[in-house]
Amino acid sequence: MGNAAYLPYAAVTKDAAERRNWTFYKAIKKERRIVMTKNIPTRDEALALLHEYNESDSLRKHAYSVEGVMRYCARKHGEDEDKWGIIGLVHDLDYERFPDQHCTMTRKILEEHGWPEEYIRAVVSHGWGICSDVKPESVLEKTLFAIDEMTGLITANAMVRPSRSVMDMSVKSVRKKWKTPSFAAGVDRSIIQKGAEMLGVEVGELIEDTINGMREVADEIGLKEDSV
Ligand SMILES: [Fe+2]
Ligand SMILES: [Fe+2]
């Protein structure tokens, strides 16, 4: 191509490149705006949803237990306590109304409310291998997966104690129950074990974290002290 012909060609090309960049820039800006305006749910919004979809006292208390433990673990890892807690609070959102579509319906409900994908993915990953094929990847997701069942074991342990409380509960007493498969037989120890392996921690550490997290919400879950 001769010089004379080349210059206009270059000019056109440059112009096209600029236009392309501009379009690209606008697309990025639009994308950012969408992300920015995506709802970051507040605890109040999460609680309202929990109450809307769960009438059962035990399901609500389970949600508060998981929230408490997630908040405790978030602080331990230097992570976002609110985010971890909110995800814990709604993790079983659909269970009362749609037990046969557990996790699937929570995704649908949260999507309809404009929740960020990060929150939805984390919630759904707690059912990995049971009702979802989303594998826990982040520390948040692995923690939720591991402590969900553990809160059940600790609650069952509190109920058979004279105090009916988590306040005076030792790790040792839970360890004993852990090794007794007939105690709270519905608590799947293999899931907790898998969660501990994913996190690279001993089950004893999970027991301790779960007791500590549940102590922080002991009033709400009715496991503070036996006042009777
Ligand atoms: Fe669940
Ligand atoms: Fe749960």
Image: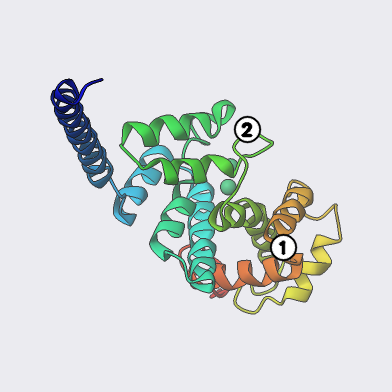
Q: Is residue 92 visible?
A: no
Using the numbered discs, state the Cα–Cα distance from disc 1 to disc 2 in whole angstroms.
Answer: 24 Å
Determine the residue located farthest toward the bottom in the rendered image: 168
Q: Could you tell me the amino acid type at mark 1?
A: Gly
The quarter of the displayed image where residue 16 is located: top left
Q: Earlier in the sequence, mark 1 or mark 2?
A: 2
The residue carrying pointer 2 sits among few (fewer than 14), some (14 to 19) or many (20 or more) residues within 10 Å by Cα, namely some
Residue shown at the point (62%, 41%) measured from the top left:
135
Q: How is the image coloured?
A: rainbow
Whether label 2 lies within 8 Å of ligand 1 gets the answer yes
The residue carrying pointer 1 sits among few (fewer than 14), some (14 to 19) or many (20 or more) residues within 10 Å by Cα, namely few
Residue shown at the point (69%, 59%) measured from the top left:
156
Describe the element under mark 1 as helix, strand or loop: loop
Question: Which numbered disc, 1 or 2, marks the residue closer to the eye?
Answer: 1
Contact between labelled residues 2 and 1, with CB atoms less than 8 Å apart: no
Residue shown at the point (31%, 36%) measured from the top left:
113
Instruction: Find residue 131 and name its label.
Output: 2
Where's the C terminus, which quadrant? bottom right
Q: Could you tell me the amino acid type at mark 2?
A: Cys
Q: Position of residue 199 (x, y in %)?
A: 67, 60
Instruction: Name the residue that disc number 1 marks.
Output: 200
Question: For the image shown, how many numbered marks are present on the structure?
Answer: 2
Describe the element under mark 2 as helix, strand or loop: loop
103, 161: nearer the viewer: 103
Left or right: 169 with respect to 63?
A: right
Where's the N terminus, which quadrant? top left
The quarter of the displayed image where residue 34 is located: top left
Rendered position, 110 above or below 152: above
Q: Position of residue 127 (x, y in %)?
A: 61, 40
